[in-house]
Amino acid sequence: MPDDPADLFVKPTWPPPYSHRDRVVEIAHAELENGDHTGLRYWVEVLPDYPDGATHPKHWCGAMALACLRWAELCEWTWVVGAGFLYVDDSGRRTREPRLPLVAVPEPGDIAYFHKAQHHAIVVEVVGGDVVTIDGNQSNRSQPPDRHRNPAILKRTRPLREAEGYFSIGGLVS
């Protein structure tokens, strides 16, 4: 058994010619099929300096979203416990402005945020007035028929208006 839990996980890699947006979505799709239903894989990626033996935060949807951005090599950001990753600066201090710009209509790879549950998801596509996302940290309650093998990571379709905001990765991909 490795001394470092991070050694248990293999970082997904994706060769060109994928666009950066496509890479984020492909990584999220891979997690949909074979991801970690406990969230540990994502916390190990986004909380690299977390104390050994400490219990990671219970809710991991944002950690999965950030891990997808990191694995797509778009950022090296880490999670700030109690603050997340969208409203913090590179030193971990909270900010009033998000580090990714808010947009009305998201594109693939963008981050959807649902305030009611403080939930993050990766945008797959927009179809009419709906957004398709890949969501981590989902419960085992009855799910729509597009559920895949991993009940904790789901592909969901919902009205665009349900999200509090969409954070564009456009500035990271240029």
Image (cartoon, rainbow, N blue to C red):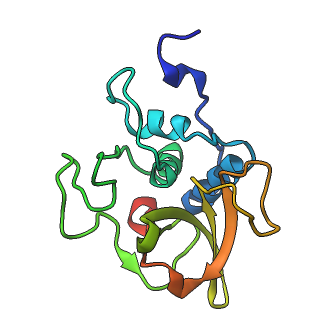
- Compare residues 21 and 122 and report the one nearer the observer: 122
| 24 sits left or right of 3 in the view | right
Work out whether residue 46 can be spotted.
Answer: yes
Q: Residue at x 45, y 54 (%)?
A: 62
**Which quadrant of the view contains residue 104?**
bottom left
Location of residue 9 in the rendering, given as x and y in whole percent from the top left corner: 59, 28
Q: Is residue 146 above or below residue 51?
A: below
Q: Is residue 148 above or below residue 159?
A: above
Q: How many marks?
A: 0
- Compare residues 174 and 32 and report the one nearer the observer: 32
Q: Is residue 107 above or below residue 66?
A: below
Q: Residue at x 66, y 47 (%)?
A: 31
- Compare residues 138 and 36 and report the one nearer the observer: 138
Location of residue 128 in the rendering, given as x and y in whole percent from the top left corner: 67, 90
Instruction: Find the residue positioned furthest to the front.
Output: 141
Location of residue 154 in the rendering, given as x and y in whole percent from the top left corner: 68, 59
Q: Residue at x 47, y 50 (%)?
A: 59
Work out whether residue 17 can be spotted.
Answer: no
Q: Quadrant of the N terminus?
A: top right
Q: Residue at x 74, y 64 (%)?
A: 142
Q: Is residue 120 above or below residue 31?
A: below
Instruction: Find the residue positioned furthest to the right.
Output: 145
| 16 sits left or right of 65 in the view | right
**Which quadrant of the view contains residue 43?**
top left
Q: Quadrant of the C terminus?
A: bottom left
- Compare residues 5 and 143 and report the one nearer the observer: 143
